[in-house]
Amino acid sequence: MLAADEIEKEIREANQRFNRDREKFEKEKELIHQKKCELEEKIKRTQKEREEIVPRIPPEQLSLYERIFRKMGGIALSPVTDDFCSMCHMRIRPQVLNELKEAKKLIICEACGRILYWKQKPETEEAKEAAGEVKIL
């Protein structure tokens, strides 16, 4: 009798754990489904934006971008911050930096072969104050 009671108790406890785990699983499943839907929507928006932008890009530049994109594993662009290519961390020569800041032509990193673009650092409050801008409260 005692053994049967203990076994029934273990079965009830196992069923309770199972039900708790099932509820937890269903919640996680729902969260993942929501995230999947959000990502699919983001993909659709991004594809629509791409379809609008691509026709305005000169074909030779688009071809260059796609070739680098395939060659470099999906990363064709590299921002230049603090005079360095962000992807390969090689210093960019001063003349190339000047050309990059002018943004009149595409510039390829001599080390990694990605298309470089100038990325300005966001101005801090201290830099604004040093430049003479007044902080309004």
Image (tube, rainbow, N blue to C red):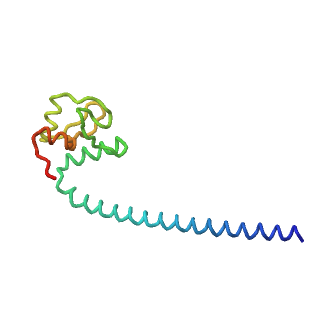
As drawn, the residue found furthest toward the front would be 137
**Is 87 on the left-hand or right-hand side of 57?**
right
Image quadrant where one finds the N terminus: bottom right
Q: Which image quarter: residue 98?
A: top left
Vertical placement of 78 versus 31: above or below? above
Q: How many marks?
A: 0
As drawn, the residue found furthest toward the right would be 1
Q: Which image quarter: residue 67?
A: top left
Task: Give coordinates of residue 93: x percent, y percent.
Answer: 20, 28
Task: Give coordinates of residue 99: x percent, y percent.
Answer: 14, 35
Q: Nearer the viewer, residue 29 or 123?
A: 123
Vertical placement of 98 versus 64: above or below? above
**Is 86 on the left-hand or right-hand side of 55?**
right
Q: Tell me what residue is drawn at x 64 percent, y 70 percent.
A: 19
Q: Nearer the viewer, residue 111 or 37?
A: 37
Q: Nearer the viewer, residue 12 or 135?
A: 135
Q: Which image quarter: residue 65?
A: top left
**Is 4 on the left-hand or right-hand side of 83?**
right
Task: Give coordinates of residue 9: x percent, y percent.
Answer: 78, 69
Q: Tell me what residue is drawn at x 27 percent, y 63 percent.
A: 48
